[in-house]
Image: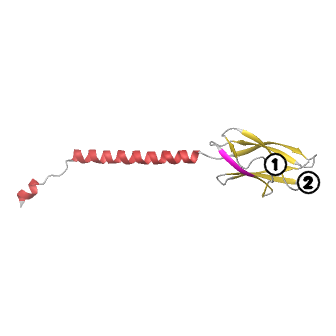
Amino acid sequence: MKRLLKSRKALSPVVAAIILIAVTVAVSIAVAAWMGALTFTFMQTEEVAFTGYTWDTTGDIEWIQLTVKNTGSTDITISGIRINDVDADDWGYTTYSLAAGSSETFTVTRSANYTSGVKYEFTVLTAKGNIFGPYIKTAP
């Protein structure tokens, strides 16, 4: 019986330490890759800023020109513009792709003319479902 136990061989402490270190390094590389992928996903943010406006209430069709800038880190697709939580009748496009860092001016009209002295709340909707605004301006 003693002879049977003596013939069993176990891993030496050096080999065991090398295996533990290899497993630890492999797991840390996997975690670092996963966290890196998560970081890139979170860094692609949509952000829109209103940078200017111009009213025209002199003709039969009254409109406002809104200038918006993509201040986020990724390109966005604008899918709509709302006035007081109602879709604008016309803003020039069905959808509009806006590159990161660029700006665009949209002519926004509505079926009812803008009323002088009334505040209007403008919001921009993106294809991802984000809503930016409100941008509140008073009609002249």
Label 2 is placed on what type of residue? Thr
**Residue topped by disc 1:** 108
Label 1 is placed on what type of residue? Val
- The residue depicted at 5 percent of the width and 57 percent of the height is 3
Q: Secondary structure at mark 2?
A: loop
**Residue topped by disc 2:** 115
Disc 1 to disc 2, how far (Cα)? 15 Å
Q: What residue span does the magenta drawing correspond to?
A: 76-80
**Which residue occupies the extreme bottom position in the image?**
1
Q: Residues within 10 Å of mark 2 (few under 14, many from 20)?
A: few
N-terminal of the pair, mark 1 or mark 2, is: 1
The kind of secondary structure the magenta stretch mainly shows is strand
Q: Secondary structure at mark 1?
A: strand
- The residue depicted at 35 percent of the width and 47 percent of the height is 24
Q: Is 59 placed left or right of 98 in the picture?
A: right
Foreground residue, 13 or 18?
18
Residue 63 image position (x, y, % from top left): 86, 47
Q: Is 113 placed left or right of 1 in the picture?
A: right
Q: Is label 1 or label 2 in front?
A: 1
Q: Is 40 placed left or right of 113 in the picture?
A: left
